[in-house]
């Protein structure tokens, strides 16, 4: 009986530890995406929009 309880406690602890670790990894990846990747994408979009505007303005100025 005691051996079975130890096995159950080990399995329960292993499961809880695995879920906790997976949650921590997910949280770290999500935070990295929010703090690093998304601002970089937004900056690239802003630069591209400015480039398009500048090209239109340049073409319009040289229409004569």
Image (cartoon, rainbow, N blue to C red):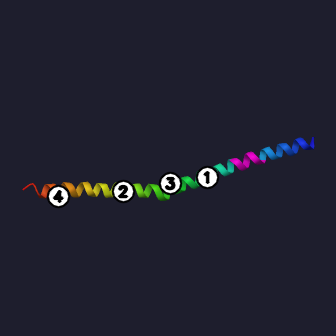
* For residue 7, above or below residue 54: above
Which residue does the image show at 77% across and 48% down from the upper left?
Answer: 13
At numbered mark 4, what does the secondary structure look like: helix, strand or loop?
Answer: helix
Sooner in the amino-acid sequence: mark 2 or mark 4: 2
Sooner in the amino-acid sequence: mark 1 or mark 3: 1
Report if residue 17 lies within the magenta region.
yes
**Cα–Cα span, label 4 and label 1:** 48 Å
Tell me which corner region of the image, top left, top right, bottom left or bottom right, holds residue 48. bottom left
Task: Give left or right: position of 27 versus 5.
Answer: left
Sooner in the amino-acid sequence: mark 2 or mark 3: 3
Point out residue 12 in the picture as x, y percentages from the top left corner: 78, 45
Task: Give left or right: position of 58 versus 52.
Answer: left
**Cα–Cα span, label 2 and label 1:** 27 Å
Total numbered labels: 4
Q: Which residue is mark 1?
A: 25
At numbered mark 2, what does the secondary structure look like: helix, strand or loop?
Answer: helix
At numbered mark 3, what does the secondary structure look like: helix, strand or loop?
Answer: helix
Report if residue 11 lies within the magenta region.
no
Residue 44 disc label:
2
Point out residue 63 in the picture as x, y percentages from the top left corner: 9, 54
Q: Which residue is mark 4?
A: 58
Q: Which residue is mark 3?
A: 33
């Amino acid at each position: 009986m005691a051996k079975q309880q130890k096995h159950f406690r080990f399995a329960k602890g292993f499961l809880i530890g695995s879920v906790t670790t997976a949650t921590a990894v997910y949280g770290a990846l999500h935070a990295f995406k929010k703090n690093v990747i998304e601002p970089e994408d937004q900056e690239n979009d802003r630069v591209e929009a400015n480039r398009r505007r500048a090209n239109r303005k340049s073409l319009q100025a040289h229409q004569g």
